[in-house]
Amino acid sequence: MRTLARDTSAEAERVLIDLLRQASPARKLAMMLDANRTARMLAMTGLRERHPEESESQLRRRLADLWLGPDLAAKAYGPSGGK
């Protein structure tokens, strides 16, 4: 049987799935919030490296484009300011 990740053994994946099944809904939500926070931090770090001249607000607007897509970000936050 193939595992979801090529670098994970079937036994390790089974243990992980069992632990996730046993986790409370609150724990699962906390894990998802942590993963989302980490993804946002990594995305912002990449944006800062690619656009060092831009302000934090400009970078957050770029993040909205990545996170929501340009159309929805424009509806939510207005035009991006001529990227």
Image: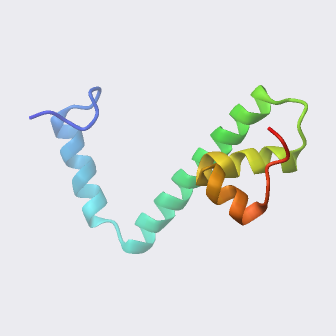
Mark count: 0
Q: Quadrant of the C terminus?
A: top right
Q: Which one is in front, 68 or 44?
A: 68
Q: Which one is in front, 78 or 68?
A: 78
Residue occupying the point 79% across, 49% down: 80
Query: Which of the 4 image quarters holds residue 20?
Result: bottom left
Residue occupying the point 28% across, 33% down: 5
Whole-percent x, y for residue 44 in the image: 71, 41
Q: How is the image coloured?
A: rainbow
Left or right: residue 42 versus residue 14 is right
Going by the picture, which residue comes out furthest to the left? 1
Whole-percent x, y for residue 21 in the image: 25, 63
Residue occupying the point 48% across, 59% down: 32
Above or below residue 1? Residue 38 is below
Above or below residue 24? Residue 79 is above
Left or right: residue 29 versus residue 65 is left
Whole-percent x, y for residue 51 in the image: 81, 30
Query: Which of the 4 image quarters holds residue 68?
Result: bottom right
Above or below residue 30? Residue 54 is above
Left or right: residue 11 versus residue 49 is left
Going by the picture, which residue comes out furthest to the bottom? 25
Q: Quadrant of the N terminus?
A: top left
Whole-percent x, y for residue 70 in the image: 65, 49
